[in-house]
């Protein structure tokens, strides 16, 4: 098999968790060296609910970005939508170029979501103000009703919480984050103001990978990786060229001790090999001609951001003759497992001079 090379516009990551402190220092350089924009999730402890907190967090991210960061690397800051968020402060932060939008977490749905809400439509006045100012709403679309089957919770949330908001406030730009089911694909396709981000792990794994032949805790995330049928539908959407779907890694590091525990933390750390994983999937599906749109263009268009002029070159080696590491260590010795080493054995990439 011959080597393959592909030049694309610099990619963006429209959903990433960078954490804070030692973990931030360890993981931020991977995102900063790969992606032009990174929409940084606000679910810290305490959550990022003010312009001042967002600005301070952005400064910490830039300080941690490392010497190999892209010259155009830009942390994109969103506020945590809850009762502590002050609308006037959010709008002032947006006017100052600090605040990009807001993220909604159902309380208890995932990591550091205890401060989230119980009803998305309960924030209607805030959402209307966001729509008026052109600020997007990013949504973790997952029901927390214990009576709903785990694999049906995205569909239930979309039907009972997100769809009423989309229909009540059609001017509001919405992103269904980390789509894991056809229900997520459907609401995007049926509403022009709704876009959807898709992760490398939901593109390439299904619940058989997670549960067959022994539970693999490093593939546990929220929303949970779903059936093979759902994965195939998601992959078809991502590779279709539909501009409503775009890349968000949802890279979410946890210490090894939290992933290999009685109660496993939800999250997959994929930032080091995120681009390689999605390139290999597009290659397998014969869709490399659609890769640039998915990782570089569609998200920028959805958010009204200029497309990148800088380029990167991806290369698929004829032989998988390297063994990428599958772990990193923070300064205090904490181990974090990395998703995607198998794809990284095939692919490499490098920035191209302007």
Image (tube, helix red, strand yellow):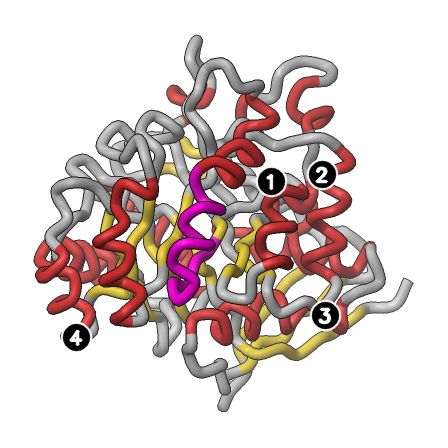
CA distance for labels 4 and 2: 40 Å
CA distance for labels 3 and 4: 35 Å
Mark 4 touches mark 2? (CB < 8 Å) = no
CA distance for labels 2 and 3: 20 Å
Residue 341 left/right relative to 178? right
Residue 172 x/y as whole percent: 38, 63
Residue that appears at 35% across and 77% down? 71
Label 1 CA crowd tier, 10 Å (few <14, some 14–19, many 20+): many
Q: Nearer the viewer, residue 218 or 33?
A: 218
Residue 13 left/right relative to 214? left
- Sequence-wise, the earlier of marks 1 and 4 is 4
* Residue 180: assigned label: 1
User: Which residue in the protein does label 4 denote?
Assistant: 95
Q: Answer with the quarter of the image where residue 20 lies.
A: top left
User: Which residue in the protein does label 2 denote?
Assistant: 230
- Where disc 1 sits, the SS reads loop
User: Which residue in the protein does label 3 denote?
Assistant: 290
Label 3 CA crowd tier, 10 Å (few <14, some 14–19, many 20+): some
Q: Nearer the viewer, residue 265 or 168?
A: 168
Q: Which residues are magenta?
A: 161-175
Residue positioned most to the front: 168
Q: Is residue 114 above or below residue 285?
A: above
Mark 1 touches mark 4? (CB < 8 Å) = no
Mark 3 touches mark 1? (CB < 8 Å) = no
- Sequence-wise, the earlier of marks 2 and 3 is 2
Which marked residue is nearer to the observer: mark 3 or mark 4? Answer: 4
Q: Dividing the image into 4 quarters, which one contains the N terminus?
A: bottom right
Residue that appears at 70% across and 32% down? 206
Residue that appears at 74% across and 74% down? 5
Which marked residue is nearer to the observer: mark 2 or mark 3? Answer: 2
């Amino acid at each position: 098999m011959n080597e393959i090379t592909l030049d694309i516009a610099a990619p963006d990551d429209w959903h990433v968790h960078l954490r804070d402190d030692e973990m931030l220092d360890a993981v931020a350089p991977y995102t900063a060296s790969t992606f032009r924009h990174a929409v940084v999730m606000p679910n810290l402890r305490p959550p990022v609910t003010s312009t001042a907190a967002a600005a301070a967090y952005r400064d910490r991210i830039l300080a941690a970005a490392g010497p190999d960061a892209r010259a155009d690397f830009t942390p994109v800051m969103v506020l945590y939508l809850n009762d502590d968020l002050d609308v006037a402060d959010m709008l002032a932060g947006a006017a100052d170029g600090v605040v990009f939008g807001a993220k909604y977490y159902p309380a208890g749905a995932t990591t550091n979501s205890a401060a989230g809400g119980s009803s998305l439509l309960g924030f209607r006045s805030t959402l209307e103000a966001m729509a008026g100012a052109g600020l997007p709403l990013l949504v973790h679309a997952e029901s927390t009703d214990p009576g709903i089957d785990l694999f049906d919770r995205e569909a239930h949330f979309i039907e009972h919480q997100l769809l009423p908001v989309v229909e009540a406030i059609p001017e509001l730009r919405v992103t269904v984050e980390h789509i894991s089911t056809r229900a997520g694909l459907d609401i995007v396709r049926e509403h022009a103001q709704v876009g959807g981000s898709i992760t490398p792990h939901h593109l390439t794994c299904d619940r058989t990978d997670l549960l067959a032949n022994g539970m693999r805790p490093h593939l546990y995330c929220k929303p949970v990786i779903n059936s093979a049928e759902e994965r195939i539908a998601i992959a078809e959407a991502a590779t279709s060229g539909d501009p409503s779907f775009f890349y968000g890694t949802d890279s979410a590091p946890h210490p090894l001790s939290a992933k290999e525990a009685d109660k496993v933390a939800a999250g997959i750390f994929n930032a080091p090999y995120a681009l390689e994983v999605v390139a290999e999937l597009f290659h397998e599906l014969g869709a490399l001609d659609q890769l640039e749109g998915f990782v570089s263009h569609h998200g920028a268009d959805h958010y009204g951001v200029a497309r990148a002029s800088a380029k990167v070159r991806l290369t698929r080696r004829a032989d998988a003759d390297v063994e990428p590491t599958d772990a990193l260590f923070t300064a205090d010795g904490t181990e974090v497992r990395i998703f995607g080493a198998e794809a990284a054995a095939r692919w490499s990439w490098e920035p191209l001079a302007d």
